[in-house]
């Protein structure tokens, strides 16, 4: 299985490797996000049916490696361009290798939730998501019949408030996520009748939350990385 990951994101590789069943190997190809410091990423802004050259190069690398399936571990491109990006990415991948099973993390979240019968997730938003990103996420989910009753944004403390949200991931915020803190935060909140919990960011470490009792009663938890693995394994059946 090949995964395409932002060049400075270690989380998908760590989590999907731990989750993969025996006999499934994970191979990573990275791309550099076209974003300058201080700039908000609001999508790739590329023509329909033509994902960015950085993603095409990553796909070509995975083809040379010889993987059987490809997943994109980056939800933002999908949610900012729901009408064209997922389709364009899949078509570009199939032009490179017509035998691949393919999914984006955003697509995988939708499919994974539908298989589980979940439609109303409470969302834990990563601390580096900006307001436009949150709006794009909830709009994307609604397109597929998923309506969140509420969300909260996980915060890292006062020391991080001096930095713009869009820069926090690059500054190391992904290493500051503490599972116990996330769990305690969830337990203290009204989840507003949600039927599940969603952590949408591929760079938000969430695997260690699975072994903890997040809520009472327990709710199924979906994450970008876990759902992507599930989707590609499902396609291979």
Image (spheres, rainbow, N blue to C red):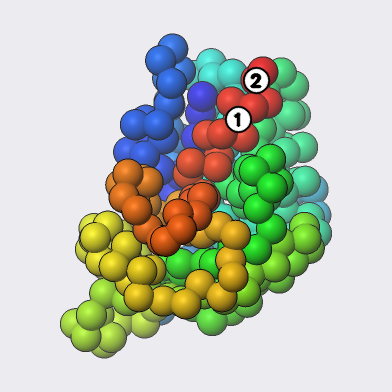
Q: Nearer the viewer, residue 157 or 222?
A: 222
- At 28% across and 86% down in the image, what residue appears? 161
Closest to the observer, 204 or 124: 124
Residue 32 can be seen, yes or no: no
Look at 33% across and 71% down and name the residue there: 185
In the rendered view, does 141 fall on the left or right side of 212?
right
**Above/below status of 114 relative to 155:** above
- Residue at 36%, 39% in the rendered image: 15
From this viewpoint, which residue is outermost toward the front? 217
> What's the distance in space between the residues labelled 2 and 1, CA to CA?
6 Å
Q: Where, quadrant-wise, is the C terminus in this rendering?
A: top right
Front-lying residue, 67 or 18: 18
Residue 179 lies left or right of residue 236; in this view the side is left
Residue 110 picture location, percent across and down = 67, 50
For disc 1, the neighbor class at 10 Å (few under 14, some 14 to 19, many from 20) is: many
Q: Which residue is mark 2?
A: 236
Residue 232, numbered circle: 1
Callout 1 secondary element:
helix
What kind of element bears circle 2?
helix
- Of 154 and 120, nearer the camera is 120
- In the rendered structure, are the residues bearing label 2 and label 1 in contact, judged by CB atoms less than 8 Å apart? yes
Q: Which mark is residue 208?
A: none
How far from the left and from the top, in percent, is residue 33? 48, 57
């Amino acid at each position: 299985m090949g995964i395409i990951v932002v060049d400075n994101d270690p989380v998908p590789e760590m989590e999907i490797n731990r989750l993969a069943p025996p006999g499934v190997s994970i191979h990573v190809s990275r791309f550099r996000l076209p974003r300058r410091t201080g700039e908000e990423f609001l999508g790739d802004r590329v023509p329909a049916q033509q994902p960015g050259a950085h993603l095409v190069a990553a796909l070509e690398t995975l083809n040379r490696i010889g993987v059987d399936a490809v997943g994109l571990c980056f939800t933002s491109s999908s949610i900012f361009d729901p009408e064209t990006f997922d389709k364009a990415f899949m078509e570009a991948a199939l032009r490179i290798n017509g035998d691949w099973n393919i999914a984006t993390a955003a697509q995988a979240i939708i499919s994974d939730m539908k298989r589980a019968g979940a439609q109303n997730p409470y969302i834990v938003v990563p601390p580096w998501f900006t307001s436009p990103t949150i709006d794009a996420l909830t709009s994307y989910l609604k397109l597929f019949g998923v309506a969140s009753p509420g969300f909260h944004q996980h915060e890292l403390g006062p020391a991080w408030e001096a930095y713009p949200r869009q820069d926090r991931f690059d500054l190391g915020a992904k290493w500051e996520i503490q599972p116990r803190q996330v769990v305690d935060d969830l337990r203290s909140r009204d989840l507003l009748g949600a039927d599940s919990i969603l952590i949408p960011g591929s760079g938000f470490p969430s695997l260690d939350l699975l072994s903890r009792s997040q809520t009472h009663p327990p709710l199924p938890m979906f994450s970008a990385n876990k759902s992507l693995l599930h989707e590609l394994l499902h396609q291979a059946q």
